[in-house]
Image (tube, rainbow, N blue to C red):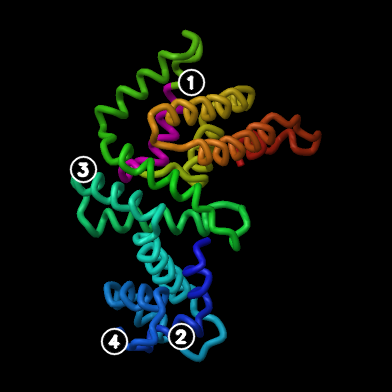
Amino acid sequence: MHPTIARFLDLSTAVATLEKLESETTLDADESALITAAAAHPGSRKAVLASKGKKKPSPEAEQHLILLATRAAARRLAVDPRLGPRIDTARAALEKAGASAEEADGLITQTVLEEAFGYAEDPDTFDADFLAETLESLPHLAVVDQETIDAWLEDFARAGDDGQRALRLKVAEEVLQAAWSDGPQPITPEHIDEALEELGDSVAASEFALAARTVEQLLAFLLTRHVIGRERLGRLSHLVETAASAGADPLEPDEAEDPEDDEAP
């Protein structure tokens, strides 16, 4: 995760910073970013300050703390020599596509949050390469509309053997419904888990491994459309491969009557 997030996940540090004034000359760049983020989100600021003196914030206050820390990190990244220009490009593309400034900032903040908490990689390490890749995908995602999705569904379905077209179409529909029901955004492990669960419920157990491999093929297809990058492809493909292996394992004798064993994890 970004060092600014790590710094302000400590409740006492965050509270002490939020109690400072923006005009104080002793503010460092991280502190200034947190205070500015809090000024734009007074409800979050209030929730965090209400936890002053506690060893641990309530779950609700903890969520506000994470969001403020992430928004502060996004502000720091906006002036980063490498990532700042990518953020500017992504924001401009999103706004050109019709997103409000608030919506664009929210999606950019979401990418920073995902890098910090979305994967099992070492949270003490900030993966700037992965975040850069995600930011580069946002301008491509910004121009995806229903017409584009329909064309991609048809292209992906037709790219397979005649006997697999129905399955390819179903897999693509399940993945894109899980990921893009609220609009195109970076595809996450949660989206893949949801799609695999739906596929596990709707295809025969003997077809699940093939359906999972088809999910991988869809992800590779989306790579060519620039809406996911190679690092994301690798991470999501590993998740799918794990699910496919689990789904392909033979049942133990005492598990043969349990229908849940035929479902995706």
Tag 3 residue: 97
Instruction: Tell which circle, 2 or 4, labels the residue nearer the N-terminal end.
Output: 4
* CB atoms of marks 2 and 4 within 8 Å: no
Measuring 57% from the left and 37% from the top, which residue is drawn there? 234
Task: Examine the structure image and report whether residue 179 is included in the region drawn in magenta.
Answer: yes
Q: CA distance from mark 4 to mark 1?
A: 61 Å
Query: What's the distance in space between the residues labelled 1 and 2, CA to CA?
Result: 51 Å
Residue 216 position in % (x across, y down): 54, 29
Along the line of sight, the residue nearer the viewer: 102 or 179: 102
Residues rendered magenta in the picture: 169-184
Looking at numbered disc 3 in the image, what kind of residue is underneath it?
Ala
Q: Residue 175: which disc?
A: none
Residue 23: mark in rendering: 4
Kind of residue sitting beneath label 1: Leu
Distance from Cα at disc 2 to Cα at disc 4: 24 Å
Q: Residue at x 38, y 43 (%)?
A: 136
The residue tagged 1 is 167
User: Which callout, 4 or 1, points at the residue further toward the start of the chain?
Assistant: 4
**Upstream in sequence: badge 3 or badge 4:** 4
